[in-house]
Image (tube, grey):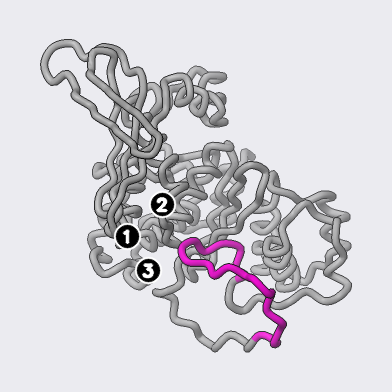
Amino acid sequence: MNASTNVAARKPDTFPSMLERFKGEIGRALPKHLDGDRMARIALTSFRSNPKLAKCEPRSVFASIIVASQLGLEPGVMGQCYLIPYKDECQLQIGYQGLIELVRRSGKIKRVEAHVVHANDTFTYRTGMQTVLEHEPVLEGDPGEPRLAYAVAEFVSGGFHVEVMTKHQIEAIRDRSQNVQNAKKYGKKTPWDTDPEEMWRKTLVRRICKYLPKSAELATAIALENTSDRGAQQHIDIDDAIDGTWAPVEADDDAAVVVEMPKEKIAAATPAPAPAPTAAPESAPASQETETAAPTAGDTTPSAADQEPGIFGLSDAMDRLLMESARVAGVTREQLIAQYGRIDLSNYNGVRADLKSMAEGG
């Protein structure tokens, strides 16, 4: 019996039946500018247009739809996001247009765009006390091969931010992608092969996003992309997606960050317990834009025995989330160590998914 047969035996739900059963949850997750019925139709169309999605576990496809709904992005032809089969899991991939849409929604960016510069274009870029960028593309005739790309963001408050990358820099990022490496190994194509210039623009938008004000939605979208690039499974749990508490692990320069889904559309059943008063640091900077590493509502502080440092290669916030999942599943830290050994970025999401399954009696 193969893995897909095991999944089917354990999860008898089909995606269309789950979509109908949880249509109300999709509606509650959506922002005002999206309609629940329209999102359900788009989701069903995406599922039926890609036969490989039928081989994925239906709950992972549905969970990806819920996360897309909370981000306010539509899967499919508009290029905002895509449902991508990865082994037996559906992954949510954010498109170039989706990233731009999330940047604009911050309310602090007036304009953001990215362009590819070809060999026969006229292009000038100077930086210093003032930045000068001028691009005159060839609109008729042969523009030549792509040689670099740039992104420009104009702030509502005035001023610009510019990012420029050469062909060598862009292709170095492409070649580091685990998905690209796997595709080459098995002779398959990726969007870098079928839509290279769109991927160039997307690379520049992702680069400039590092320097722009971030909403929780944008931070989550970038974390999804980084997880996919590493060739790791996103492990989007359906209950966490509905609750808005799913936390992808983002690895950036060896620093682990837990990014939580936006919470404004989640109706809390009970108020979170008031935290114990603690002394504030003398000079703690206020966070103004990005939500990172905040434990979800309802998390409990690990006991003194659970606070032993150095056991796992995780940040404090990630460790708290892990131990809360273990507590719900009735598993101790010692049992986790015996079962998994070291838990770090490479297996963190998988361990949390296992604990969730244990808690549900799976």
Report how far apart the C-alphas of labels 1 and 2 lie in the structure: 9 Å
Q: Please state the horizontal and vertical placement of residue 89, each as a whole percent of the image.
A: 52, 45
Q: Magenta span has 66? A: no
Which residue occupies 65% across, 62% down? Answer: 357
The residue mark sitting in front, 1 or 3, is: 1
Pointer 1 or 2: first along the chain: 1
Q: Tell me which amino acid carries mark 2.
A: Leu
Residue 46 in view here? no
Q: Magenta span has 294? A: yes
Name the foreground residue: 137 vs 291: 137
Q: Which mark is residue 108?
A: 1
Residue 29 in the figure: left or right of residue 293: left
Report how far apart the C-alphas of labels 3 and 2 lie in the structure: 25 Å
Which residue occupies 68% across, 75% down? Answer: 282
Q: Which residues are magenta?
A: 275-295
Residue 138 in the figure: left or right of residue 210: left
Q: Please state the horizontal and vertical placement of residue 42, each as a whole percent of the image.
A: 27, 52
What is the secondary structure assignment of the residue under circle 3?
helix
Q: Which mark is residue 212?
A: 2
Q: Where on the picture, by quarter, is residue 62?
A: bottom left
Q: Quadrant of the C terminus?
A: bottom right
The residue mark sitting in front, 3 or 2, is: 2
Q: Quadrant of the N terminus?
A: top right
Q: Say above or below: 48 vs 218.
A: above
